[in-house]
Every structure is written in C-alpha cells, then in structure tokens.
Image (cartoon, rainbow, N blue to C red):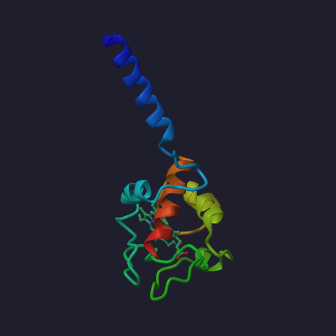
Amino acid sequence: MRRTVLALGLALAAGSMALTPAASAEEGDAAAGKKVFRKCQACHTVQEGKHRQGPSLYGVVGRKAGTAEGFKRYSDAMKAHDVVWDAESLSTYLENPKEAVPGNKMIFVGLKDAQDRADIIAYLKQAAE
Ligand code: HEC
C-alpha cells in the first residue's frame, strides 16, 4: 500500500512539472528578466527620462537606436546605428555589444545565454506597458 501511495505521488509530481509552461527562448519570461536586469542597473533604469551612465531603457523596444530623449552621451556609432530596436536586433546587440555596434560606448561583455536575452527583452517590453 505504502508503495502505491509513493508511486502515485511521484506520478503526480512528474505530471505537474510537465504542466508548468516552460518559457521558450522566443517568448522570454519578464520576471526572470527583471533579475537579469540587475546586470544593467548600474548604468540603466527602466523609468522614463531617468538616465544614468547609459540611457533610460523605458520604451526601448520599438525605439530607433540612439534616440532616448534627453540623453546626451550617445556615441556617434550608436547615433548612426540605423535600426529600430526589436527582439532580434536587441538580442544581437546584447549578446556582443562591441561586435554588433562597433565603436559604441557600452562597456558590457554581453549576455551569452539566449534565454537571458529573451527574458530581459520581455522585461523591457513589460516595463514600458
Ligand atoms: C557600464 C555601463 C553599462 C552597463 C552595465 C550596461 N549598459 Fe547598456 N548602455 C550603456 C551606455 C553608455 C550606452 C550608450 C552607448 C553608446 O551611445 O554608444 C548603452 C546603450 C544601451 C542600449 C541602446 C539604447 C538606445 O537608446 O539606443 C541598450 C538597448 C542597452 N544599453 C541595454 C543594456 C542592457 C539590457 C544591459 C544589461 C544586460 C546593459 N545595457 C548594460 C552603458 C551600460
């Protein structure tokens, strides 16, 4: 009897794990992204108009690169970077900032984990809602 109960318990545990939706790389998980954002906080906020060493990232998804209002310290490279930030371009930039936008001034090694990048992009989207 004991053994049956144990087996049932294990089956239930396995079942509930399978039911928990795992965030896919494309979707991203904003709550997890908030934690990853700790790596950015020394230089960035997600509050509108609140700049630090780096520009405010409020509304950055959908914004042309190098155009946060009131931020005066963009490099020429970033101002000339002709993209409207979306999930794809942000992911490329955050993976390797130096390579994606040569000459840009963000001193950051990059987020090597694709899931971290998807999560942070989900967080940045949510923070502007
Ligand atoms: C050491 C400071 C620093 C850190 C850490 C940092 N950034 Fe930056 N970031 C900057 C600076 C400075 C710029 C402006 C770069 C330029 O103009 O060349 C920038 C620019 C950006 C831009 C382009 C913004 C725009 O308005 O076009 C994005 C997006 C960005 N950072 C995201 C992030 C994320 C996400 C993280 C964390 C994973 C991060 N940064 C970590 C300093 C930093």
Residue at the outermost left position: 2
Residue at the outermost bottom position: 70
Q: Quadrant of residue 48?
A: bottom left
Q: Is residue 20 left or right of residue 86?
A: left
Q: Residue at x 40, y 73 (%)?
A: 46
Considering only vertical position in the picture, is 15 above or below 111?
above
Considering only vertical position in the picture, is 53 above or below 27?
below
Q: Residue at x 67, y 74 (%)?
A: 83
Q: Residue at x 65, y 76 (%)?
A: 84
Residue at the outermost front position: 1
Considering only vertical position in the picture, is 103 above or below 76?
above
Q: How many marks?
A: 0
Q: Residue at x 55, y 76 (%)?
A: 75
Q: Is residue 124 left or right of residue 34?
A: right
Residue at the outermost right position: 82
Q: Is residue 110 visible?
A: no
From the top left corner, tell me how far across and down residue 115 is, in percent. 53, 49
From the top left corner, tell me how far across and down residue 91 is, in percent. 59, 59
From the top left corner, tell me how far across and down residue 60 is, in percent. 53, 75
Q: Is residue 13 visible?
A: yes
Q: Is residue 16 left or right of residue 27?
A: left
Q: The N terminus is located in which quarter?
A: top left
From the top left corner, tell me how far across and down residue 3 is, in percent. 35, 11
